[in-house]
Image (cartoon, rainbow, N blue to C red):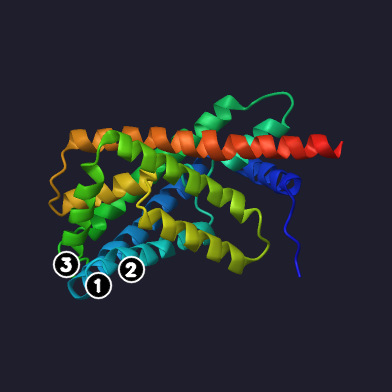
């Protein structure tokens, strides 16, 4: 029976993983971020397909079924070791904290900026592929379009709050993955987080933007200006939730655990 690691051990594992992520060559980082972008689109497409199949018969249960389907996309992402914006907050910050000579600001910004950009590039290209007429089952486009309108036309403060929650969930995922020791446990954790993310729905900027873009391709009443606002608000909320609430609180937890052990 394996024993769950204590906060100090989790933080040490995070710092090691963060070093790997920060040290990635440009081509590797761009590739893994690009892969993450189109991988998560599978989850969005699955959500739309399942929602369209379930809603005519079971109405409101379709939202639950769609969330269950979306979780598979996060599992593919984690098992494939792709690089998703916000999921890579905790690990590299842990590395920066353990380094006494530098906070590695330029390398952190490089990691997060390139991840964000290539997540969107990879995801957008795959959205265009799957939105070709006949690529998805009948009704899927309508379901994705309806959800996109619901996402994009919320009040900004509500979207910001949902993005804080989404940032917490996705950054918490990286912490939880370091707390388990088996592939099965990693898959279970990834699936649960993906399910909760879609069930809210809680905004992760990459997922949200790609979902709205998917809907726009199927005729959603969403303009480019609204898409830009959605991107900005979701990003801000993810930073507050992912960095402010999860990452820095776990840094404080690990620091306190080390001080108590000295």
Q: In which quarter of the view is residue 196 placed?
A: bottom left
Q: Residues within 10 Å of mark 1 (few under 14, many from 20)?
A: some
Task: Single out the mark in the foreground, 3 or 2.
Answer: 2
Q: Earlier in the sequence, mark 3 or mark 2?
A: 2
Q: Is residue 9 left or right of residue 32?
A: right
Q: Are marks 3 and 1 in contact (CB under 8 Å)?
A: no
Measured in 3D between alpha carbons, the distance from the residue under mark 3 to the one under mark 2, in whole angstroms, is 15 Å
- Please state, as top left, top right, bottom left or bottom right, where the N terminus lies in the image: bottom right
Q: Are marks 3 and 2 in contact (CB under 8 Å)?
A: no
Give SS at disc 2: helix
Q: In which quarter of the view is residue 137 placed?
A: bottom left
Measured in 3D between alpha carbons, the distance from the residue under mark 3 to the one under mark 1, in whole angstroms, is 11 Å
Front one among 21 and 47: 47
| x and y percentages locating residue 47 in the rendered image | 31, 63
Let me know if residue 198 appears in the view: yes
Residue at 37%, 56% (x, y): give it.
Answer: 198
Give SS at disc 3: loop
Measured in 3D between alpha carbons, the distance from the residue under mark 2 to the one under mark 1, in whole angstroms, is 7 Å
Q: Are marks 2 and 1 in contact (CB under 8 Å)?
A: yes
Q: Residues within 10 Å of mark 2 (few under 14, many from 20)?
A: many
Vertical relation: 8 (above or below) 49: above
Residue projecting furthest to the right: 262
Q: Earlier in the sequence, mark 2 or mark 1?
A: 1
What residue is disc 2 on?
65
């Amino acid at each position: 029976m394996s024993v769950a690691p204590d906060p100090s051990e989790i933080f040490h594992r995070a710092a090691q993983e963060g070093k790997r992520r920060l040290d990635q060559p440009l081509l590797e980082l761009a590739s893994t971020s690009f892969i993450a972008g189109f991988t998560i689109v599978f989850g969005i497409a699955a959500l739309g397909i399942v929602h369209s199949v379930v809603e005519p018969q079971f109405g409101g249960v379709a939202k639950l079924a769609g969330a269950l389907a979306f979780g598979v996309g996060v599992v593919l992402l984690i098992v494939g070791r792709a690089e998703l914006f916000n999921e890579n907050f905790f690990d590299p910050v842990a590395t920066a904290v353990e380094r006494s000579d530098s906070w590695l600001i330029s390398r952190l910004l490089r990691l997060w900026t390139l991840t964000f950009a290539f997540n969107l590039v990879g995801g957008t290209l795959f959205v265009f592929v799957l939105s070709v007429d006949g690529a998805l089952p009948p009704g899927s486009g309508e379901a994705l379009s309806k959800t996109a309108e619901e996402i994009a036309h919320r009040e900004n403060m509500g979207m910001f709050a949902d993005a804080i929650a989404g940032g917490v969930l996705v950054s918490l995922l990286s912490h939880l993955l370091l707390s388990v020791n088996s592939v099965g446990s990693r898959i279970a954790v990834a699936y649960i987080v993906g399910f909760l993310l879609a069930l809210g729905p809680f905004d992760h900027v990459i997922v949200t933007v790609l979902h709205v873009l998917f809907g726009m391709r199927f005729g959603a009443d969403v303009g480019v200006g609204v898409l830009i606002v959605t991107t900005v608000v979701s990003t801000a909320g993810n930073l507050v939730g992912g960095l402010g609430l999860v990452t820095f609180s776990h840094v404080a937890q690990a620091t306190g655990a080390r001080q108590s052990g000295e």
